[in-house]
Image (cartoon, rainbow, N blue to C red):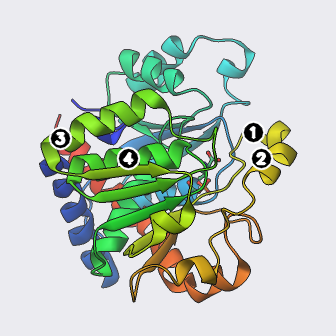
Amino acid sequence: MRHFLTLDDFSKDEILQMINLAGKIKKEAKVREFKPYLKDQTLAMIFEKSSTRTRVSFEVGMYQLGGHALFLSANDLQIGRGEPIKDTARVISSMCDMAMLRVNRHETLEEFAKFSQNPVINGLSDKFHPVQLMADYLTMRERGSGEKIAYIGDGNNMAHSWLMLASKLGLELRIATPKGYEPDAKILEKAQQNAKISGAKIYLSNEPKEAVAGADVVTTDTWVSMGQEGEKEKRLREFAGFCVDENLMSLAAKNAIFLHCLPAYRGYEVSEAMFEAHADEIFAEAQNRLHAQKGVMVWLNDKR
Ligand code: CP
Ligand code: NVA
């Protein structure tokens, strides 16, 4: 039995198996052929934070796979009143076939997984957002884009997830953050270790232009993640110069694509014109959450 907490727990082959499965299920769904890969199965979805895409894609995904998803807000569960996560995990995993959690602290997810009898999926934590990266990679593959990626902005859960994807698959990843907003040193070190095996190239700088030069994929994320609202003013000041606009994008490779996990804050991490010029791939990426996660869930189910 496997959990899906970070891409670091998977080999390159395993990640590609899930991506291929997602592609196959997507093809079937395009002609409205919904095969019941997870017939009568239930997915518990626990949210400690807001969500649009994650909630909708998992819920619709389970339905289309012949199963059912339960939306559980942490505020409404007894964990909100202090019931230990390990007890919640034992109860929920005795009734549901899988769980997906969106949590403030990655440790909550690890604790839940430790006590769960069934697969647990990370629907975003402070450290990682791996299901988003599955959708992002599926989108890159569909668009036939090259594999030089520039990530501009905050060294946050999305930057960490790109580090894991790139270092596992052997891609080139250039991250540019303002000083003081670099990715977590331990996660970076892990990525560098993975890169030695996969042949990935990982570069870190504080210079967006350097990172974007010649890139095939340019991506960014909000400067103020959920839970960081108190630092908003300071962050907006310190991220000045890191907006992905058309000038910056013009340094990327011809036909480079722009990805954004969404929600996007125009005028901050991305300009309005840049966003709208690339809306086609951004919303294809968002829709790919539905398909990519089906691949992940069916793969996890096959492994037990
Ligand atoms: N990208 C993403 O996870 O979106 P939501 O926060 O809307 O789920
Ligand atoms: N870094 C963002 C991603 C949102 C999908 C956050 O954690 O809020």
Q: Which residue is mark 2?
A: 235
Residue 196: image tag: 3
* Mark 1 or 2, closer to the camera: 2
Which residue is nearer to you in this view: 154 or 64?
154
- Disc 1 element: loop
Query: Sequence-wise, which precedes: disc 3 or disc 2?
Result: 3
The three-letter code of the residue at mark 1 reads Gln
**Mark 1 vs ligand 2: CB below 8 Å:** yes
Residue behind mark 1:
228
| Dot 2 amino acid type | Arg
Foreground: disc 4 or disc 1: 4
Q: How many marks?
A: 4
Q: Is residue 64 visible?
A: no
Q: Is residue 272 above or below residue 269?
A: below
Residue 221 picture location, percent across and down: 60, 58
Looking at the rendered structure, the kind of residue marked 3 is Lys
10 Å crowding of disc 3: few (<14), some (14-19), many (20+): few
Report crowding for label 2: few under 14, some 14 to 19, many 20 or more residues within 10 A (C-alpha).
some
Alpha carbon separation for disc pair 2 and 4? 22 Å
User: Which residue has dot 4 on it?
Assistant: 163
Q: Measure the alpha-carbon separation of dots 3 and 4.
A: 13 Å
Picture coordinates of residue 301, whole percent (x, y): 23, 42
Q: Earlier in the sequence, mark 1 or mark 3?
A: 3
Type of the residue with mark 4: Leu
